[in-house]
Amino acid sequence: MASPFTVHEGVAAPLMLDNVDTDQIIPSREMKAVSRDGLSVGLFAGWRYVSAESREPQADFVLNKPAFRDASVLIAGENFGCGSSREHAVWALAEFGIRAIVAKSFGAIFRDNCVRNGILPIGLPSEDVQAIAVQAVSGARVCIDLPDQTMTCGDHQYAFDIDAYAKRLLVGGLDPIGLTQSRSGEISAFLDRDRAARPWIYGS
Amino acid sequence: MAQTIFDKLWQAHRIADAGDGADLIAIDRVMLHERTGGVALKSLAEAGQPVLAPERAFAIMDHIVSFRAGRGRDESRSPGGETFITQTRAMAKAAGIHLIDTDDARQGIVHVVAPELGLAVPGASIVCPDSHTCSLGALGALAWGIGSSEAEHALATGALRVTKPIQKRVCFNGHLGTGVTAKDAALHLISLHGSGGGARAAIEFAGSAVEAMDIEARLTLCNLAVEFAAFTAVIAPDDKVFAYLQGRPYAPDNELWSRAEASWRALHTDDDAAFDDEIEIDAGDIAPTVSWGTSPEEAVPVTGHVPSDARPAALSYMGLSAGAKLDQLPIDGVFIGSCTNGRLSDLRAAGDVLRGRQVAEGVRAICVPGSQSVLRAAEAEGLDKVFRQAGFEWGSPGCAMCFYAGGETFPPGARVVSSTNRNFEGRQGPGVRTHLASPATVAASAVAGRIADARMFAPMDAVS
């Protein structure tokens, strides 16, 4: 299970593009095994390397720049993580060391995948994201307090919204399967009622 | 209180309040494929968790399978990809879930197969670790894409914790013009409202143009909801849906049919139900639409130009200049297939353009039917011959050229017109420049050797 997320301070890397899709975050050709592990080497492979074969770093890609090599926060544009549902994108980010992503909005499945893997997706208005990106370029670190729902960068503090369920999972490092299994009595009762009401669903 | 169809679907599956604003939602069907489903089965097995309802879980091989005609049982398109096939097969068998293997007569792309088999029916809740699961809303199902961890969750518990999305209605009023398809309608919508335009929303597609669509066109429309950032899409089921489903293997049998149909007829939005947002589009304003950039929102009419304010990064990747006329762009390849446009009606539409014509020299043209059932039906009416005689390769069903996972594809820099769903950088291969379009537009472009308007290619039998 993901480690709990309470307060995190770190370097923020600006990747100020809109509609960064999960094919960019991890190209399908980098998913080589039926596994959640070993994916960080393929993170942003299309942008991070001169060629897929050589693995020679593309010098101007943000995560290859010395100042951002150890980034643990990404600052991005609108609709980050759109596209394919592949959770491998989030596993690759987590293995690389990313703990939070700040963007105007996120792909819905990607956002849920983040929460399931201990990465905090922070949605902020464009102007705030832009301002944070400017600070990040100049080397300011960010400090995120999830219980408090605030993020500090330079002299500014930003309050962010997050739905209560995602917050509880992240702060507690909780396993939703366990949470749901604790409701198994209600699930069984529902299934008994529903089997009578909609028998065609159950292959009677 | 007046309800939307989505409200009704949600309520019917709501087991309980899950706290924190989320609901515990019952999952009727879990669909898996070897690319993201195998890893879910593996994690579950490692955790010692059994599948709660294996009789309602289905694994289908589609993503990594070779599209080579006459492919072997474990043959993958990408080097090393066979491990996804063999491991998913072994784990599906161990978990006791249904398995539709590479050599099964029912095999195909999961979202093409689910309606064919009657696994997707109105009112069913269906999840799959694949973003295009929203396609199945075309039949009035509550269907959405999830990650692999949530697939484990659904397999282990029969339920998911979900925060109810906001709701939008998109009405296509009036009639689509001749030669204008559901694909064009979806690209038009996304180009107007942006790739993020449906964020966090369940979308109901409605209006006379949607009512007039056949089931396969509706599947195409709903398929592209995820490219609009939507949670999912749904269309109220009608007589066309009921007629489509009757007699399919997993659809209700004769004994239960009338009961099922009666419950399905209640699945529509009440007159006074409220949406968070409504979009109205005059279907008559929609032209055959083609993407020019690297996001589905970067699309214009086939007779149009690359916008003057186009993103430089997109222009650079696509090898285009602002102002370029789309229907003058020479192409190197075409692809017809995918969960978006790989069904029989799609192949027929392309076949009408290709019959009696030839693919232009220098253009590599590939067609991969969406399922074995589509392949058999197409071959039964001679469509394979039409495609082959025109110069197309005719492949074995699967996700094939829609995404690249290594192995054979178009070369870097190739300009490809494709009936698929994503024009992302590298989606069809490193450096490949994808233009999204309807199957007819793809076929016309193959013949012209440049992006072309299919309305200029009347069926040859009509001409003669």
Image (spheres, coloured by chain):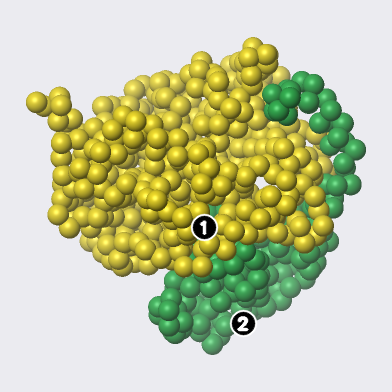
Chain colours: A green, B yellow
Amino acid at circle 2 = Asp
Disc 2: CA contacts within 10 A as few (<14), some (14-19) or many (>=20): some
Residue located at (62% from left, 53% from top): B89
| Closer mark to the observer between disc 1 and disc 2 | 1
Residue at mark 2: chain: A
Residue at mark 1: chain: B
The total number of labels drawn is 2
Alpha carbon of mark 1 to alpha carbon of mark 2: how far? 41 Å
Quadrant that contains the C terminus of chain B? top left
Tell me residue B187's x, y (percent): 38, 42
Disc 1: CA contacts within 10 A as few (<14), some (14-19) or many (>=20): some
Tell me residue A186's x, y (percent): 87, 36
Is residue B422 among the parts visible in the rendering?
Answer: no
Q: Is residue B111 toward the left or the right of residue A118 in the image?
A: left
Secondary element under disc 1, as helix, strand or loop, is: loop
Q: Is residue B165 toward the left or the right of residue B80 in the image?
A: right
- Label at residue B74: 1
Quadrant that contains the N terminus of chain B? top right
Residue located at (73% from left, 52% from top): B94
Tell me residue B331's x, y (percent): 21, 55
Q: Residue furthest left?
A: B464
Is residue B52 among the parts visible in the rendering?
Answer: yes
Residue located at (83% from left, 25% from top): A193
Q: Residue furthest bottom?
A: A66
Secondary element under disc 2, as helix, strand or loop, is: loop
Q: In terms of image quadrants, where is residue B254?
A: top right
A79 or B265, nearer to the observer: B265
Q: In terms of image quadrants, where is residue A37?
A: bottom right
Q: In terms of image quadrants, where is residue B453?
A: top left
Amino acid at circle 1 = Asp
Tell me residue B129's x, y (percent): 61, 50
To which residue does mark 2 refer?
A: A70
